[in-house]
Each structure stands twice: as C-alpha cells, then as structure tokens.
Image: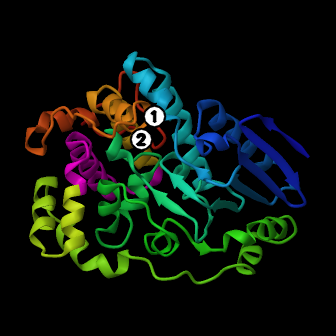
Amino acid sequence: MESGTPDVLLRTEGRAGFVTLNRPRVINALTHTMVLAVDRALTAWEHDPAVTTVVIEGAGERGLCAGGDIRAIHDDARAAGTASAAFWRDEYRLNARIARYPKPCVALMDGIVMGGGVGVSAHGSVRVVTERSRVAMPETGIGFVPDVGGTYLLGRAPGELGTHLALTGSPIGAADALLTGLADHVVPSAELPALAGDLTRLPADEAVSRHTVTPPPGVLAEQREWIDACYRAETVEAIVERLFDTGVPAAKETATTLLAKSPTALKATLATLRRSRALGTLEEVLDLEFRVSCAALTTPDLVEGIRAQVVDKDRDPHWTPPTLPEVSAADLTRFFAPPPGGDLGLAGTLPPA
C-alpha cells in the first residue's frame, strides 16, 4: 500500500513500513511538511500490528538527507520570522520519537547524511551505513550549532572525537561512523535493495545480519591521540593553539579549518556539547539545543553563513565578530536563555541560562 505526500512517500510491504524522503534534487532536504508527514506515518504504524519494522530511506542516488531546508531558514532569519522555531519544535520532537520508537526503526544512511538527516537516522535502533556514506554535522560552517540531538550523539563518542566532528563539521565514512556511535552496521550500497526486500519478511536484526560487512579502516582511530590531547582544552582558542603546536600536519590543517568557521558558532558549539554531556537524556539535550538554535536564528552569522555557502555560493563569509577572542561571555550566555516562544519542554523545565 502506498500513500504520503510528494515529498514523503509511504508504503507498506510485508511486515515493513517504508518512509522515503523524496526531494532528490536537493538531497532530500527536510521541510516542516515532511517532518509532520513522517510523524504521522510513525503514529499509524506504531498501532498497526501488521507493521513490525519501519525503514527510513532517501530517494535518488546522492544520499538519505542533506539536512534541513536551510534556504528557508535563511529567509526566515532575515525576516525575523517564527517559521524556523516552529519547524524545530516538530523536528526535535520527531528525533526524540524515533529514538523511543517501540518497533525497530532501520535507517539506510547511504550517501550524504548531514544535519537533519542525522536526526532522522542516527537516533534509530538499527543504523546502516555503506561505503558511500558521508555523515556529518557541518553547522559551524554556516554560523549554526549542531542540533537534532547531534550534541547528544557526538558528546558520547569516544574521547574527544565528537568534539572534533562538532567543531570542524568534517564528514566521516562507514568505519568512523561505527567508531563514533553514529551507526551500527555496514552494508554494501549495491545490496540495499536486497536488504529492503529481506526487511519485508524477516526481523530487522536477522535481515541486516545477512548483508553486513566489515568496512576498510577509517581515519579517526589513528588520529585519536592528537584529537584527544587537543580538544580536551578548556576553550576554542586553546584547542586551536594546541592543534597548531602538535607538529602533526593533519592537526595543523584542522586548526586552519576551524579558523574559517564562525567564531561565535564554534564557541557556542563547544559550550553546548559540554553542557549536553552533563545531561542524562536525549530529551534534555534536545530541549537545550532548541534554546541554542532559536538564539542562533537571531545572530548575523547564520544569515551570512547560509548566504556564503548556499545562496551566493561565494564561500567567503564575513563573520560578526570576526575572531574568537571577540566573542564575549555575554554573547554565549544568550544562547542558553529561554526563547521568546517558550522552551521545547520535552524533558520538563531546563535550568536558567
């Protein structure tokens, strides 16, 4: 049986319900309408005894999902609107729902999986990557902060690997997705149709195990020593200094990468990540991230970052303020204050900023 909207295709086959994100021209970037459609499908299938497994996949050859529709966020931020906050309220609730879903939720994380794409996949109970997967939370490059529970996931990665990925926004492949806890299994992309077929007739774990392979080594394991040593520093400035001082070429390149990101977003990301580590549940972290996201919407860097990367594509953002030392403590405190429309409230009441 097939249903859904043009941007989200739904079908049931055998014992499985399939959600297909269907905006392939923009790598299935999420809109508010899509989030609501996925949530409705999860509601229907949760109470349908014929559906025992839910599968989330993306249309087209490029990836599962490149994230939220950041052009829409750009336009909303420029207009001082409320659409983005409304979108995030429902998106973050969907992220939490996927994490707590009572039936196996299998995410086929093939190709590009970034930002909001991580939110609808990496909280699932069975997360499958392929040799084509490129998983990332690249928000600091557009003047934003990792959200959709990204600071929860990255905050629980081994050592300081998650801090490295959160600040740099670097994409990782299959082996590193396993290492950092963003995925569970590797399946060759050519076998995804066969896996989908098996999911219609077999329990999820049994179906996936028939196709799982061991990926080639990633890069993070061999970089772990300098990553842990540098990123445990107290501040972003100190992290950058340590990276330059290591004598490791890859570390120095990373320092240069960081200095091209939004200074405000870098500092807000580090502060959010460390607060997230102290919280106990995904819901608490999503509540925190909602505050941070709403605050970021009012900063000049979010509009400027999206302009430079997506709208004009000149790749030359002009950050405000332009350097790390110019980002004050007061600039950071405002990220953790309740937003004008009220807190998300998934886990109750957050403490004051």
Q: CA distance from mark 1 to mark 2?
A: 5 Å
Q: Earlier in the sequence, mark 1 or mark 2?
A: 2
Residue, x 47% and y 34% (percent of image)?
A: 70
Q: Is residue 330 left or right of residue 343?
A: left
Which x, y percent locates residue 338? 32, 30
Task: Look at the image and give the residue range highlighted in magenta.
Answer: 257-282
Q: Which mark is residue 195?
A: none
Task: Please give the residue where the numbered disc 2 appears in the rendered image.
Answer: 287
Q: Quadrant of the C terminus?
A: top left
Magenta stretch, main secondary structure class? helix
- Type of amino acid under label 1: Leu
* Count of numbered badges drawn on the protein: 2
Determine crowd level at label 2: few under 14, some 14-19, many 20+ residues with C-alpha closer than 10 A.
Answer: many
| Relative height, residue 62 to residue 23 (above, below) | below
The picture quadrant where one finds residue 306 is top left
Q: Does the CB distance between marks 1 and 2 fall below 8 Å?
A: yes
Task: Please give the residue where the numbered disc 1 appears in the rendered image.
Answer: 344
Residue, x 37% and y 59% (percent of image)?
A: 170
The answer to whether residue 338 is seen in the rendering is no
Determine crowd level at label 1: few under 14, some 14-19, many 20+ residues with C-alpha closer than 10 A.
Answer: many
User: Which of the pair 297/276 is nearer the observer?
Assistant: 297
Q: Secondary structure at mark 1?
A: loop
Which x, y percent locates residue 319? 21, 35
User: Which of the pair 162/51 is nearer the observer?
Assistant: 162
Residue, x 84% and y 48% (percent of image)?
A: 11
The picture quadrant where one finds residue 198 is bottom right
The answer to whether residue 283 is seen in the rendering is yes
